[in-house]
Image (tube, coloured by chain):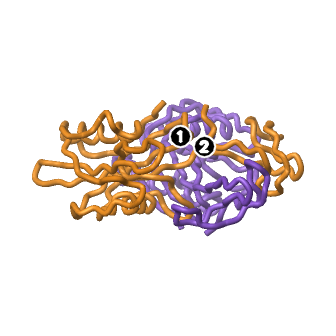
Chain colours: A purple, B orange
Amino acid sequence: MWTPHRYKFCPSCGAAVDYRVPADDNRERAVCSACEAIHYENPINVVGTLPFWEQGDQVQVLLCRRAIEPRHGFWTLPAGFLELGETSAQGAQRETDEEAGAQIELLPLYCLMNVVPVGQIHLYYRARLLSTEFKPGPETLEARLFHEHELPWDELAFRTVRETLRRFFEDRRLGRPYALHCADIS
Amino acid sequence: MWTPHRYKFCPSCGAAVDYRVPADDNRERAVCSACEAIHYENPINVVGTLPFWEQGDQVQVLLCRRAIEPRHGFWTLPAGFLELGETSAQGAQRETDEEAGAQIELLPLYCLMNVVPVGQIHLYYRARLLSTEFKPGPETLEARLFHEHELPWDELAFRTVRETLRRFFEDRRLGRPYALHCADIS
């Protein structure tokens, strides 16, 4: 298992930290050798949108080409880490604005995907585009619309982007009502 | 906004940390004064279940009386912090086992609630009880079944527990199919 952050020193007092199982616990934690504070490490959330532009029975989806690592130059749905002080829906809207400068109407949560190897949960909301003008921010090289047959499947940045897009076009093809998809990405 | 964890020292090198907005960012972060590592703080996830026992048109739900702070002595659905190395569904099952010792069949995700003031997302799955024998763990004083009219509404530990129970009985009363509820708790 990939651990996103291993403590060496105590963020409260600066003393060295040991990894051990505290009393009344069953997992190894970072425990301060001096002040005995326990520092927990937990999965974090990535929030984003699947923005689409519908005209009649045609649909296009918005992807952003990444100007930053990881996966520089690859295509992604607008998404990023959920911040303290915002809801998952607010975070998804903020990321869509920051990365694509896209005007959207946020629709219900569409995918919740556990990405256990990197300690993340990815949450994607469907989002109706209100315009086709985009103003990509500094984290994005380019933001553009794709029809299904144009999608750069081999140049997508993340597995959860692929899985979210795949489900969206499958739901449409089958005429299924959009409901939450939950999945685990190993 | 309540911040769950303020860094004073760098967990990587032990030097003092400043809160400032790093280059290419728009929020204050904990930045090490020596090694310049940036330490992000993000919302974390609480995962749990709404375990129910159905007989004909009667239903009872399982609550646990807390043996630990916060909210010692109050009633809760079995739930706790999602750990690294597990999916949200696995975490919900683990907590149900640890807190109630209940045998369940996990059903689809039922509630996703943002609790912004404490930097948490709470995820509750519906769960069918396979037996009415419980083996509460050390964090639980008592685990028992409640009919709706018996629920200890004034002695529930957390708002998300109340909101999840309320939605469950409302969905049943209205004969609505169970679908995901998303809500924000302020």
Q: Position of residue B166 (x, y in %)?
A: 29, 37
Work out whether mark 1 precedes mark 2 in sequence or the reverse, and give the earlier one. Answer: 2
Q: Position of residue A136 (x, y in %)?
A: 71, 38
Marks 1 and 2 in Cβ contact (< 8 Å): yes
**Residue at 41% from the left image edge and 59% from the top image edge:** B138
**Residue at 77% from the left image edge and 60% from the top image edge:** A16
Q: Is residue A112 visible?
A: yes
Q: Quadrant of residue B130?
A: bottom left
Q: Using residue B26 as the reference point, say whether residue B140 is left or right of it.
A: left
Q: Is residue A2 above or below residue B62?
A: below
According to the picture, the residue beneath numbered tag 2 turns out to be A82
- Nearest the viewer among A58 and B130 is B130
Q: Is residue A172 visible?
A: no
To which chain does the residue with label 2 belong?
A: A
Q: Position of residue A176 (x, y in %)?
A: 34, 50
Residue at disc 2, secondary structure? loop
How far apart marks 1 and 2 lie (CA) works out to 7 Å
Q: Give amino acid for label 2.
A: Leu
Q: How many marks?
A: 2
Q: Is residue B166 above or below residue A146?
A: above
Q: Give amino acid for label 1.
A: Ser
Q: Quadrant of residue A133?
A: top right
**Residue at 26% from the left image edge and 58% from the top image edge:** B128
> In the drawing, what numbered circle is on residue B167?
none
Q: Badge 1 local density, few (<14 within 10 Å), some, or many (20+)?
A: many
Q: Which quadrant, please, contains the N terminus of chain A?
A: bottom right
According to the picture, the residue beneath numbered tag 1 turns out to be A88
